[in-house]
Amino acid sequence: MTRIKDLPKHEMPREKLIEKGAEGLRNSELLAILLRTGIEGKNVIEVAESILKKYPMKKMLSLDFETISKIKGIGPAKATHLLAAFELTKRALEIEDNNLPIISSDKDAVAQLQELCTAEKEHFVVLYLNARNQLICKETISIGTLDASLVHPREVFKPAIENLAVSIIIAHNHPSGETSPSEADINLTQRLKEVGKLMGISLVDSLVITRNTFKSIC
């Protein structure tokens, strides 16, 4: 184990921040500054790296005191420092959230999916919403014939977890112009709705989009 104090001064996290600014540090170095000290057998940067491997950055923002304080290398005192930093981050993000589009109807959703109207191949796209029904992320999950084997729940809900979404809207286009959902469309919608219930992430709508119109399956 390399001790932090044995590192060249320009590689020490706090000194590096002073010299280069916070934007010049890796995620593990920023977290190391908040943690301050390591544990037996691991310096503070190594502790930070192990924590980040287990918890993605955005996932960490949703952790509570009990969970954080039980992470090896943190404990109650450090947990309070991290929670304070996380809360400041979330409050800052809420200020920026005022510029995010609000999805309050199927028409609002379709307005964010105009590329599907003219797509020549079938695209499956997911809109990820926060608690204010604001669009925080949009992901294309698959391109081609819609099939349950191509649209797996883990691919749909992984971005939801990473972006702390509380609900999703799924959509796909029918290049043929036919808005009636197929049996596969209906089955996939039901499957994702059931998975969403288990994960606490609501599926609020499922849309079939064509060049001139759209239809809600839900």
Image: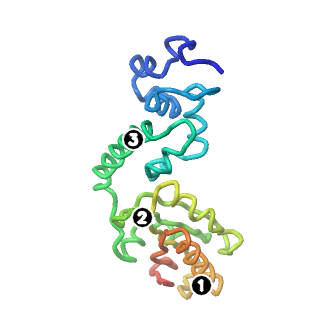
Asked which colour scheme the image uses, the reply is rainbow
Residue 44: give x, y in percent of width and height.
54, 27
| N-terminal label among 1 and 2 | 2
Residue 117 vs residue 98, the one in the foreground: 98
Between the C-alphas of marks 1 and 2, the distance is 22 Å
| Mark toward the viewer: 1 or 2 | 2
| Mark toward the viewer: 3 or 2 | 3
Q: Count the marks.
A: 3
Residue 61 vs residue 23, the one in the foreground: 61
In the picture, the disc for residue 17 is: none
* Image marks 1 and 2: residues in contact by CB distance under 8 Å: no
Would you call the spot at circle 3 few (<14 residues within 10 Å), some (14-19), or many (20 or more)?
some
Reading the image, the residue beneath label 3 is: 80
Reading the image, the residue beneath label 2 is: 129
Which three-letter amino acid code belongs to the residue tagged 3? Thr
Relative vertical location of residue 94 with respect to residue 186 in this rendering, above or below: above
Element at badge 1?
helix
Which three-letter amino acid code belongs to the residue tagged 2? Leu
| Mark toward the viewer: 3 or 1 | 3
Q: Tell me the residue at 49%/69% (across/down).
A: 200
Element at badge 3?
helix
Between the C-alphas of marks 3 and 1, the distance is 46 Å
Residue 3: give x, y in percent of width and height.
59, 18
Q: Tell me the residue at 51%/84% (across/down).
A: 217
In what quadrant of the picture does the N terminus appear? Answer: top right
Residue 140: give x, y in percent of width and height.
56, 62
* Image marks 3 and 1: residues in contact by CB distance under 8 Å: no
In the picture, the disc for residue 186 is: 1
Between the C-alphas of marks 3 and 2, the distance is 29 Å
Relative vertical location of residue 76 with respect to residue 104 in this rendering, above or below: above
